[in-house]
């Protein structure tokens, strides 16, 4: 048996590369990363043509070690080329992500040391770091001293945790489910609808509150709905507002809604996955006034803090509710009960073992300081205003609303023909060009173009390029049509 063990050991030891092997592999990987970053300024934001990753399928897993240069080439051609390039500053569609470099180094260290960030007992340092980030977020958003939260994989899971917490806090899991009312608008992010369904609340009454012309929840209409619902024997329970809708960037009247929620004892959830971090800036403070009134709040550092995908946050004003919904103590973890100075992420989330995602946020915040983040967010708000002013004054284009934050909705109105058809073609032309990526939406039945600014790599020159592409392609299209 000893011989057998030793034979297996000599094969298994390949999983612990020598310093020299590490150096060689690391060099190839870092060289690839450097090449990627050094060419990001001129790389396309979207590649419509080419492989769709099929090459990966031609290289299946085998028993034998691979060649690192071939593997890097596979990543380059099959993964990092086709489709959307979210690392590009030209990513102006959906809600752009980020990918600041020092976050990658934080992830690198988190993976190398592999701290167990689920329980304070197991890694007091890792958990303190994550809890410190959560307390900083709670303070930033003005949630008060009793607030706490959890770092999640993204906004969708953060919304789910918030909805489950609201469900339990408002006792929506009893047999009167069909009488409990949730108030939202049609512009609420679909991850909230998903969360409501996953949380077993699909049988609640969902009221779609009317919106004003700027796609903000109409507070007066909400108040009336609540009164009518009460009269008819229903139980108003949860109000869900958006601090920056994904579609148009509209911010609901957060303070007014907070007052209505308070008076009517509704759980007040604000989805600020897109817009929340603008609260770091003076302009944002005014536009997001009232955000601290939330009972639960979602922000997405992989959007507004420019981190790479894989980090969101849920914050709950009264942390006890969050814990009540998620705490569980199995026998095999009872040793952890002895360490109580800090709460454990596992008590605030469905996750036990998890990525130590705090380090990818802590490291860049500490290396850069907060100032460049605030400046970048302020810059994005002004860039959106600049794009709005320019496109509005460009003959042929029309805009919907002045942006609340950094999303502008617009379209070209051709002299002849169907505007929907024209703008669909215009979008296609822009994507074929590939230097910028924009997306579309439907507003009042019309096909509209969206420009969303949130990449830390988007600057004035990017917006000038976007304007120039839109002008050129719309003029070309109009010529073709005539
Ligand atoms: C992006 C977004 C979400 C979903 O967050 P993910 O991080 O993509 O899971 C939820 N709500 C709003 C308003 C968003 O913009």
Image (tube, rainbow, N blue to C red):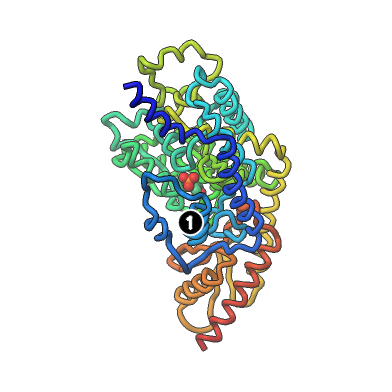
Residue at figure coordinates x 59%, y 38% from the top left = 20
Residue at figure coordinates x 46%, y 27% from the top left = 348
Percent coordinates x, y for residue 212 in the rendering: 51, 55
Could you say which is closer to the camera, residue 433 or residue 412? 433
Q: Quadrant of residue 165?
A: top left
| Residue 14 in sight here | yes
Bin the neighbour count of mark 1 within 10 Å (Cα to Cα): few under 14, some 14-19, many 20 and up: some
Residue at figure coordinates x 49%, y 41% from the top left = 154
Q: Farthest residue to the top: give it.
A: 338
Q: Is residue 16 left or right of residue 286?
A: left
Against 48, residue 277 (above or below) is above
Q: Farthest residue to the bottom: give it.
A: 482
Could you say which is closer to the camera, residue 92 or residue 44? 44
Percent coordinates x, y for residue 401 in the rendering: 58, 61
Against 409, residue 75 (above or below) is above
Could you say which is closer to the camera, residue 455 or residue 481? 455
Q: Does the Cβ of the disc 1 residue fall within 8 Å of ligand 1? A: no
Q: Which residue is disc 1 drawn over?
A: 74
| Residue 220 in sight here | no
Q: Secondary structure at mark 1?
A: helix
Percent coordinates x, y for residue 260 in the rendering: 50, 38
Percent coordinates x, y for residue 238 in the rendering: 42, 37
Against 126, residue 111 (above or below) is below
């Amino acid at each position: 048996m000893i011989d057998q063990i030793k034979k297996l050991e000599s094969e298994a030891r390949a999983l612990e590369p020598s310093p020299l092997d590490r150096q060689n592999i690391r060099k190839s990987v870092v060289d690839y990363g450097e090449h990627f970053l050094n060419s990001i300024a001129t790389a396309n934001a979207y590649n419509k043509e080419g492989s769709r990753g099929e090459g990966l399928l031609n290289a299946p897993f085998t028993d034998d070690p691979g060649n690192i240069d071939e593997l890097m080439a596979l990543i380059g051609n099959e993964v990092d080329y086709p489709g959307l390039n979210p690392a590009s500053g030209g990513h102006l569609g959906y809600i752009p992500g980020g990918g600041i470099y020092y976050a990658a180094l934080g992830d690198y260290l988190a993976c190398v040391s592999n701290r167990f960030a689920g329980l304070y007992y197991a890694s007091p340092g890792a958990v303190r770091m994550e809890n410190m980030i959560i307390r900083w977020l709670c303070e930033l958003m003005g949630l008060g001293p009793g607030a706490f939260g959890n770092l999640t994989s993204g906004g969708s899971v953060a919304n789910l945790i918030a909805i489950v917490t609201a469900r339990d806090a408002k006792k929506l899991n009893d047999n009167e489910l069909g009488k409990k009312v949730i108030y939202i608008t049609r512009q609420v992010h679909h991850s909230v609808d998903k969360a409501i369904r996953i949380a077993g609340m699909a049988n609640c009454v969902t009221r779609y509150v009317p919106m004003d012309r700027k796609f903000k929840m109409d507070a007066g209409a909400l108040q009336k709905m609540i009164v009518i619902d009460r009269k008819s024997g229903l139980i108003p329970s949860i109000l869900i507002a958006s601090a920056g809708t994904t579609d148009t960037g509209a911010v609901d009247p957060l303070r007014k809604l907070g007052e209505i929620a308070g008076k009517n004892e509704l759980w007040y959830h604000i989805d600020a996955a897109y817009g929340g971090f603008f609260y770091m800036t003076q302009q944002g403070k005014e536009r997001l006034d009232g955000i601290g009134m939330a009972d639960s709040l979602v922000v997405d550092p992989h959007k507004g803090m420019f981190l790479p995908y894989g980090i969101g946050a849920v914050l709950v004003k009264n942390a006890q509710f969050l814990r009540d919904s998620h705490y569980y103590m199995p026998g095999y973890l009872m040793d952890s009960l002895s360490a109580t100075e800090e709460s454990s992420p596992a008590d605030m989330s469905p996750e036990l073992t998890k990525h130590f995602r705090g380090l990818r946020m802590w490291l860049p915040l500490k290396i850069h300081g907060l100032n460049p983040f605030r400046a970048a967010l302020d810059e994005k708000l002004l860039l959106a205003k600049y794009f709005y002013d320019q496109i509005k004054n460009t003959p042929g284009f029309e805009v919907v609303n002045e942006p609340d934050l950094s999303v502008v909705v617009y379209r070209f109105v051709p002299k002849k023909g169907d505007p929907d058809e024209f703008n669909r073609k215009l979008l296609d032309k822009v994507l074929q060009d590939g230097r910028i990526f924009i997306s579309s939406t439907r507003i009042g039945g019309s096909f509209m173009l969206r420009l969303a600014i949130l990449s830390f790599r988007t600057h004035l020159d990017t917006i000038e390029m976007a304007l120039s592409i839109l002008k050129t392609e719309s003029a070309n299209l109009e010529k073709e049509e005539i």
